Amino acid sequence: MIRFDSVTKKYPGTTRPALDSIDLEILRGEFVFLVGASGSGKSSCLRLMLKEEKPSKGKIHVLGQDLGAISNRKVPYFRRNVGVVFQDFRLLPNKSVYANVAFTLQVIGKSRGFIQEAVPDVLRLVGLDGKAQRLPHELSGGEQQRVAIARAIVNKPQLLLADEPTGNLDPTTSAGIMTLLERISTGGTTIVMATHEAGIVDQMKRRVVELSAGQIVRDERSGGYGATSAVPVVRAETGEQLPTAPAPKVQAQVMQNAQPLYVEPEVTDDVTDAAAAVTAAATAAIVIEPVEPPATTMSRPALPVTSTGDDVPEQLTLAEKLGLRAPGGNRNDTGEQEVGPTR
Ligand SMILES: Nc1ncnc2c1ncn2[C@@H]1O[C@H](COP(=O)(O)OP(=O)(O)OP(=O)(O)O)[C@@H](O)[C@H]1O
């Protein structure tokens, strides 16, 4: 499904690599957490898997394809099989929930009939079937993230990449999002998720790959978060060590005491709401701890905007960022403007 062979990523103008000779194999259907201190290379890993960045050395295979052999023109076709979810949702602000999800299918040329079936189906799966006509700002943060997840999976990708998808959400809502991701995973989708949330990782007991200063320092089949948040942050550009990484919001202890996140799917469409209710009840005791910002803020570019080649424009539309259209391709009537969290 995913293979990294001695992959090194060194960004221009930096003194040390963001990823340093990484070997990694992820099999079909796995649910893998990428953990590690801020700056350890998690987002770089995801960007490489999506071919948003090119490795400086080494080879990457995703979905059976050698990413180095895919031309920029063919990248959107590759990405049709890869869903992506970001911390800041990236929804179209002036489009309804339905239109946001339908957009993905319109861009890749699916028929109206297909869209009219697929969108309600996926909105039911994420528990938003009653909210199809709402605008993003009329939804809670958790609901907005569920729209983003619906958009990411509506084309039934084999692989879902998630970069801190609960980063903007409170602990209970985060647990609900994890319930949903776990359900998507049981449907056979491979999921790779970068996170700082110790409680979630400890509770779900999935494969954990830990990065430290660009190297894999731990790869456990059924692991916990470990002590990564205590690992000093290292700035790739200078090698300077920063004192702390962001504190996780969902405390491990509380999540350990919570009931399992996953609820067996039922035949009714209310299953997601039922699962969310169970999760909410189980995590009702969670105390929302104020998250102190790190002593020094890391300068890090937004995940998808990085230019990958000489012929790729700097300003990418949403469809281009999501890999649904080749950069510079025909920008028709899809109204591509994006929005982050609206609360
Ligand atoms: N476009 C870039 N140009 C230069 N350096 C970069 C770039 N992107 C990332 N880096 C550096 O590469 C290193 C790894 O960054 P990356 O974003 O992959 O870490 P991360 O583990 O995802 O961090 P966080 O948890 O804060 O999101 C960091 O030192 C970062 O400063």
Image (cartoon, grey):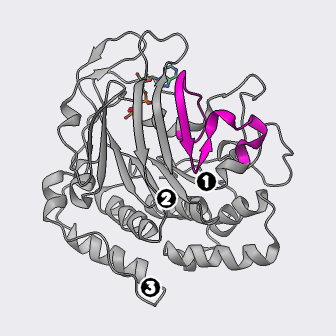
Say whether residue 264 is left or right of residue 256: right
What mark, if any, has residue 124 been given in the picture? none
Residue 270 shows which numbered tag?
Answer: 3
Identify residue for label 2. Answer: 145
Q: Earlier in the sequence, mark 2 or mark 1?
A: 1
Which amino acid, by three-letter code, is at mark 1? Leu
Is residue 120 located in the magenta-colored stretch of the structure? no
Amino acid type, residue under disc 2 in the picture: Gln
Q: Residue at x 35, y 48 (%)?
A: 33
Magenta-highlighted residues: 49-76
Separation of marks 2 and 1 at Cα, in angstroms:
9 Å
Q: Nearer the viewer, residue 288 or 194?
A: 194
Give the class, few, some or many, for how many residues have Cα within 10 Å of label 1's Cα (few <14, many ≥20). many
Q: Report how far apart the C-alphas of labels 3 and 1 lie in the structure.
A: 24 Å
Q: Is residue 302 visible?
A: no
Q: What residue does disc 1 label?
A: 91
